[in-house]
Image: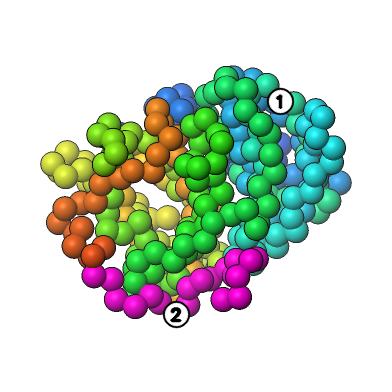
Amino acid sequence: MSHRGLLIKSQDVPVDRGGVLLDVTPQAAGWEYISFTVRRIPRGTRSTGRTDGQECCLVLLSGHCTVVWEGSGVRTLGRRATVFDSYPHAVYLPHGHDYELQAIETTDLAECRAPSTRPLEARVVRPEDCGFEIRGGGNATRQIVDILPPAFPADRLLICEVFTPSGNWSSYPPHKHDTDDPPIEVVLEETYYFRMKDARGFGFQRVYTADGRFDETLTVADGDLVLIREGYHPFVTAFGYDAYYLNVLAGTRRSMAASDDPRYAEFRRSWPAPDPRVPMVKPPYQSV
């Protein structure tokens, strides 16, 4: 466990944990806000939960399920074969809600939580509600799909999916969000949860501070999780292997403001043409 960048390898998680593939609490992460769990619900079985003192967003990674909370009626999430096959389905549940999930087929869900007691509205986030952005250019092109952007009426949680074609850089130029200096930059904790289109795939994430106090390069594979507490954190995926990561962010301000490493910030002003392989996943509302 490193001080600022923490890599949790998928193979380090015990296989039989009642369907929990990965689970990180603020206490384990050494930070204040984000809890992150990946749960596998076998076909025909149920999973229940509650959001006391927390807001929660359930993001469908694969499968097909129903979800119900008090007064909601039955809502359906999916079908999503894999994260690379279609846009996300999600449900946002604020503080004070009991919920029950039933898997129509085996379902993988990311459970993203942050502290909250605000009386907000529960809602389903459909694929057509999610964002679409092609960011960067050349071999730094990637696709951004917002699930809970800053405009979404949540308390702390900010969530997006990022698709990076093989050999490309992402989260580039390197940026950070560890200084409270709005509107230029805000302090945010962040998770990167990786899935690879090919299980043999891998990539590298560098986490470093400008003053050199910390500089670590992490090898990431399918199912791995990186926790970003501080510093710049670019990612690159190996040639031949398309990559996905789910970003969950939370802090004291509802903003995605971040600062580029000034040594590389110039690239943002002069991107080449976008990589034609992007978008990797077609938005449900566009003919692209």
- Please say whether residue 59 is one of the residues in the magenta stretch: no
Residue 126 in sight here: yes
Residue flagged by tag 2: what amino acid is it?
A: Pro
- Relative to residue 161, is residue 1 depicted above or below? above
Residue range corresponding to the magenta coloring: 270-288
Q: Label 1, on which residue? A: 97
Residue flagged by tag 1: what amino acid is it?
A: His
At horizontal 39% and vertical 43% (from top left) the residue drawn is 256
| Quadrant of the frame with the C terminus | bottom right
At horizontal 74% and vertical 55% (from top left) the residue drawn is 78
Q: Is residue 262 left or right of residue 193?
A: left
At horizontal 59% and vertical 29% (from top left) the residue drawn is 55
Residue 1 in sight here: no
Label 2's element? loop
- Relative to residue 145, is residue 99 depicted above or below? above
| First-in-chain label (1 vs 2) | 1
Q: Label 2, on which residue? A: 276
Q: In this orientation, which residue lies closer to the viewer: 197 or 281?
A: 281
At horizontal 17% and vertical 38% (from top left) the residue drawn is 213
Q: Position of residue 287 (x, y in %)?
A: 61, 75
